[in-house]
Every structure is written in C-alpha cells, then in structure tokens.
Amino acid sequence: MASIDEVIASVSANANAVTEVQGQIEGSKAMTEETLGQLQALGVEGAMAAMTGCKEALEECSAMATALQNKLNEAMAAAAAAKQQ
Amino acid sequence: MAAKIESDRAAVEAVAGPINSSKGQAEHTASALGGLGVEVASERMRGVVDKIEEAESMRAALQGALVKAHFIVLSAIHGKMGPSAPGSGGVVPLTRVDPQTGAPKAGLDAIPPHLRQEPTPNGADLLEPVRRKKGATIFNEAVGKGDQIEDATKTFDKNFDLAWEAFYDEPSPSKAQQNAVSETQSSYGPVVTDVPVPKVGGGGAIMAAFVTSVVMAKAVQPIVRQFDRTHSGQRKAEDHGRQEP
C-alpha cells in the first residue's frame, strides 16, 4: 500500500502546485482588471478592448486551472479507493 | 503584465514534470498490483493513470491559453489587435462550460472550431512527383561509389600493415616510411619506448594471411606474366633459329 500512498502524495503535491498557479493567474487577472479600470478612466478605447480580451482569456485560464485541479482531485480519490480495496 | 502572464505560463509548464512523474508512479503501482494478483486495485490504479493523463492534457491546454493571453497583452502593447480582438471571431473559448451549473466541463476542446472545420488535408501536396535521373544525380552516385572505393582501399591498407607486422614482426614498408619521415622532422633525440607487439587474434591472423596471400599473388602476377612473355619469345626465337638452317 506504500506505493499507492506515494501516488496519492505525489498527485496531492501536483494539486497544490496547480492551486498556487491558479492563485498567480488570479493575481494576473486582478492586475488586468486594475489596468482596465485605469484605461476606462483615461478613455483609451483600443487598449481597453485589448485588456478586456486579456481579462477574458485569463478568466478562461482560471476556469481551466479549476478543472485541472478537479481532475487531480478525482485521481486522488480514485487512488484512495484503490487503497481501500 | 506581459511578464506576469509569462511567469504564470512558466509555472504551468513546470507542473508538467511532476504530473508525468505521478503518472509513471501510478503506472508502476498498477503493474505491481497486477503482478501481485490484486486485479481490482490494479484496475482502479489504471483509472488513476487515465485521470492523470487527462490532467496533463488539461495542463497543456492551460499553457496554450496563457500563451494566448500573453499574445493579447503584447498586441495591446504594440497597438495591433488582429485576430485576437474580441468580436473579430478569432477568440474561441477553449473550455466547454456547462450551461446549467456554469462549471467547466471535464472534456477540453483544445482545437478551436474554426480550425476543426477546415477540410482535412490529404497530404497530396507534400508528395514530390517522380523525376527521371539527371546528369547531376548520376554524377553524385558516381562520386559516392568513388568514396566507397577509397574507403575500401584504406581498409585494405590497414589490414596489409597489420598482416605485415604480424608476419615479419616489424612495421610495414609504408609505416616504416612514415616513421622515418617523422623521425627526420623531429629535432629531439629518439625516444625509446616499448612498442607492444600487435595483437592479432585467430580471426585476425587468418584475415591477415588471406590479405597477404592476395597481395603476394597480385604482386607476383605481372612478374610471372613478364617471365612467360620473355620465355615464350625466346622459345619462338629458338624455334625460328631451328627452322632457319
């Protein structure tokens, strides 16, 4: 069972790494939103459109990171189920 | 901001290694459990492997999405909006979101529809039409054969030197010549070193004997021919001499 424990620990470490990455992406998104607010205040239309696109892309990335973490959690649950067997 | 997104992308890329390592570990465990005969647990571990594989493909898609975000920011910096501008039809969501719950679905669509709906290439344009051999091709082939002959000659020379050393216990004439040249060029006194006797194994000795016999035969052949010619000439002359009187 030691080996299954190792797999679980390894996948758990990966999930933690993904959580960190997601935090970073959220940080980038917050930065984009801030820039977007500033651009709105300045009334720079072209750059605002670009920042909106960037914000959408980062939102997508954040959603993908969530999906990735869910998948890793599923893998962990499956490994735990194999251990119970 | 571009640097921040780039660092995010690098962080996502760095997760690839650990995920692959986990996959390898899970595969190993699954095969070990299978070896022990614990089939149910082994099957579940295979499920874990599949899930980790899916996670890896999702990670790759996430990395691609971050590259896209980076590109958008760079476009904004350079004032070029291009196909990544919202509303241009070029921005395609990579995730499928469940309309009821709003949560991203497990299956990711890494290939955007505008690429997927393109006609499938059949690869015909990659094939080169068959051409007849031209002068240049024939010349190149001939040069190639010349190189082969040169290689064969070098191998023969090496074998000949070995054979000579094995039989006469001294360097072959060509080697002796080389050594003599290097000795005259050197301004230092001769350095005496123990030259090991070339090791020629059983197969090597047979090969050397064969090569030597071929060389000897080739060397002797013109002499024999010359001898025959002169001899037959003498004989003819003698015959003429006998017939004349």
Image (spheres, rainbow, N blue to C red):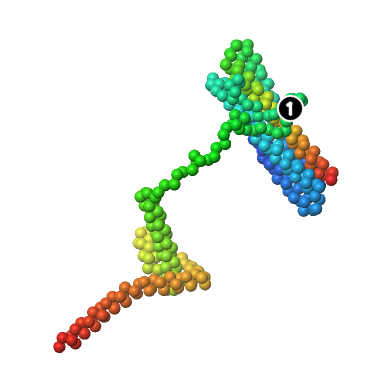
- Percent across and percent down for residue B236 are 22, 82
Residue at 40%, 60% (x, y): give it. Answer: B149
Q: Nearer the viewer, residue B138 or A55?
A: B138
Query: As displayed, is residue B214 above or below residue B92?
Result: below
Badge 1 density bin: few <14, some 14–19, many ≥20, Cα 10 Å: few
B71 horizontally vs B185: left or right: right
Query: As displayed, is residue B93 above or below residue B199?
Result: above
Q: Nearer the viewer, residue B192 or B57?
A: B57
Name the quadrant containing residue A33. top right
**Residue placed furthest toward the left:** B245
**Residue placed furthest toward the right:** A84
B109 horizontally vs B39: left or right: left
Residue at 61%, 25% (x, y): give it. Answer: B91
B219 horizontally vs B47: left or right: left
Query: As displayed, is residue B186 above or below residue B223?
Result: above
The reply to whether residue B65 is in sight is: yes
Q: Three-letter amino acid code at disc 1?
A: Asp
- Percent across and percent down for residue A24 are 68, 27
